[in-house]
Amino acid sequence: MVWDVRIWRDMGPLIRLETTLTGDRCLSILSDHLHSFMSIVHSDGLGQFQQDNAIPHASRVATKWLQEHSSDFRHFHWPPKSPEMNIIEDIRDGLVHAVEKRSPPHRTPMDLLTALQDSWGEERESMRVRVCV
């Protein structure tokens, strides 16, 4: 499983999750990766963070952390049971499609991770070109 962050004009890190995502692990990702990314790309504190309503994302510890950092960026609260309207699903579908098109196909979990990271990096570079042009 991977965790990612993306904004309109940039993409952040793709984080490999070694085990199941829990509220505590989500909190660790938010503090270790999201906070630094948002402080770089939205140093004015006007960035908005959106996530799906997965149970770890809505955990007490993650929600409390997001509230405590509301001056650094805003947390966009997503209505429950509405994934079909959530752009995160479209982004993930695009990444899955890019990985499936790769040759040779992945055969091991490490191959899959490499394909995900390569596709993520290619999309990141493509995005930079589109923004700069």
Image (cartoon, rainbow, N blue to C red):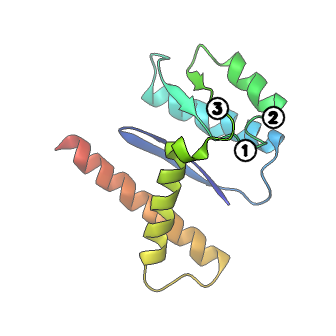
Q: Residue at x 66, y 75 (%)?
A: 109
Q: Nearer the viewer, residue 50 or 30?
A: 50
Q: Spatial distance from mark 2 to mark 1, Cα to Cα? A: 9 Å
- Where residue 107 appears, x then y in whole percent? 61, 85
Tell me the crowding category of disc 2: few under 14, some 14 to 19, or many 20 or more residues within 10 angstroms, Cα based: some
Q: Spatial distance from mark 3 to mark 1, Cα to Cα? A: 12 Å
Q: Spatial distance from mark 2 to mark 3, Cα to Cα? A: 15 Å
Q: Are marks 2 and 1 in contact (CB under 8 Å)?
A: no
Q: Nearer the viewer, residue 31 or 26?
A: 26
Q: For this view, does 6 lie left or right of residue 9? A: right
Query: What residue is disc 1 on?
Result: 54
**Circle nearer the viewer, 2 or 3:** 3
Question: Going from the N terminus, do you reach mark 2 or mark 3 first?
Answer: 2
- Where residue 128 appears, x then y in whole percent? 29, 47
Q: Secondary structure at mark 1?
A: loop
Q: Residue furthest top?
A: 71
- Where residue 2 appears, x then y in whole percent? 63, 57
Check disc 3 and give the amino acid type: Pro
Label number found at residue 79 = 3
Q: For this view, does 51 lie left or right of residue 6? A: right
Q: Nearer the viewer, residue 15 or 87?
A: 87
Check disc 1 and give the amino acid type: Ala
Q: Residue at x 24, y 50 (%)?
A: 129
**Count of numbered tags:** 3
Q: Residue at x 63, y 27 (%)?
A: 77
Check disc 2 and give the amino acid type: Ser
